[in-house]
Amino acid sequence: MNLILFGPPGSGKGTQAERLREKRGLRHLSTGDLLREAVAHGTDLGKRVKDILASGQLVSDDIILALMRAEIARVGIEGWLLDGFPRTVGQAEGLDAQLAELGQKIGAIVVLNVRREAVIERLSGRRTCTRCKTVFHVKINPPTVDGICDRCGGMLVQREDDRPATIAKRLDVYEAQTQPILAHYRGKVAMHDVNGELPVDEVTRFIELVLQ
Ligand code: AP5
C-alpha cells in the first residue's frame, strides 16, 4: 500500500514513518531528509537549497518534483510512504500525473493533527542523530547519554531550521501552502485524521487501527 503521512512541521511524521516502515516494509521517502543529505554532501542540489531550508521557506516545485519523480520510480511497485511531500497543490498535481503514468495510486493519507503551541515545544527540543537520523527530544524522549544516539552512538544535533523564528515561519508556510492539499484530495483518497498529540506509541496504534 502507498501512504502519505501529512501534518505540520513537528507533528511526528518522521517518528511515525520509521515505525510504519519497519512494520509494513514500505520505503520511507522524506523530501526533508533527501534535501538535508544533499546539503550535507555539498552536491549541486544541496548548494541550491541550503539557504531555503535554513529560512523555513519551500524549495521550488520544479526541483522537488524532479527529485521525487526519480525516487518514486526507483521504488517500483513495492510501496512507499511519503513524508513531507507533496507540500503544495502544484506538487500534488505533479504526483497525481506521475502515478497515473505508472498505474499506481495513493492508498491512504494519514493526517497528524498537532496544535501550533505543541509544535513549537517539540521542535525547540528536538535533537537528530547525524548518522542514523533517529529523532529525540531533550525532555519528552531524551537519549540515555546527553548528545549521543541510543541507536547507533552517533552525535545528536539541533537542526538549523529548529530555531524559534524559523519554526514560526515554517508553521505559517504550512498553513498557507500545504494545508490546501487536503481539499485537493478530499473525496478522492481515503483520509484518516489522527490525534498526533497522544504519546508516540498510541499514535502508532491509532494509525495501525485506521489503516486496517
Ligand atoms: P521536513 O524535513 O519535511 O520538515 P517538516 O515537515 O517541517 O517536519 P519535521 O521533520 O520538522 O517534523 P516531523 O513531522 O517529521 O516530526 P518529528 O517526527 O521529527 O522539511 C524541512 C524543510 O525542507 C522545509 O521547511 C522546506 O524548506 C524543505 N522541504 C521539504 N520538503 C519539501 C517539499 N516537498 N517542498 C518544498 N520544500 C520542502 O517529531 C518532532 C519532535 O517531536 C521530535 O523531537 C519527536 O521526538 C517529538 N515527537 C514526535 N511524536 C511525538 C508525540 N506523539 N508526542 C511527543 N513528542 C513527539
Image (spheres, grey):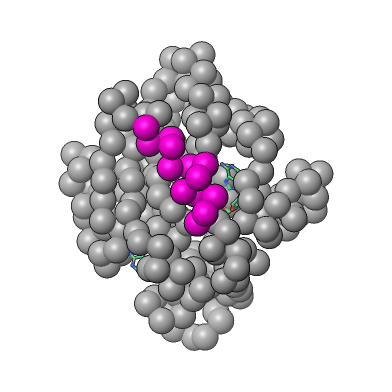
For the stretch drawn in magenta, what is the main secondary structure? helix
Residue 12 image point, x, y percent = 40, 58
Q: Is residue 180 magenta?
A: yes
In screen coordinates, is 149 left or right of 113? Answer: right
Quarter that holds the N terminus? top left
Q: Is residue 129 magenta?
A: no
In screen coordinates, is 64 left or right of 4? Answer: right
Residue 17 image point, x, y percent = 40, 51
In screen coordinates, is 104 left or right of 33? Answer: left
192 to 14, vertically: above or below: above
34 to 55, vertically: above or below: above
Q: Report the residue at 59% width, 28% height from top.
A: 69
Q: Nearer the viewer, residue 89 or 70?
A: 89
Provide the residue span drawn in magenta: 171-183
Q: Report the residue at 56% width, 81% height from top.
A: 147
Residue 18 image point, x, y percent = 41, 54
* Residue 27 visible: no
Q: Report the residue at 67% width, 31% height from top.
A: 62
Residue 141 image point, x, y percent = 39, 76
Quarter that holds the C terminus? top left
Q: Please, which residue is most extreme toward the bottom here?
A: 145
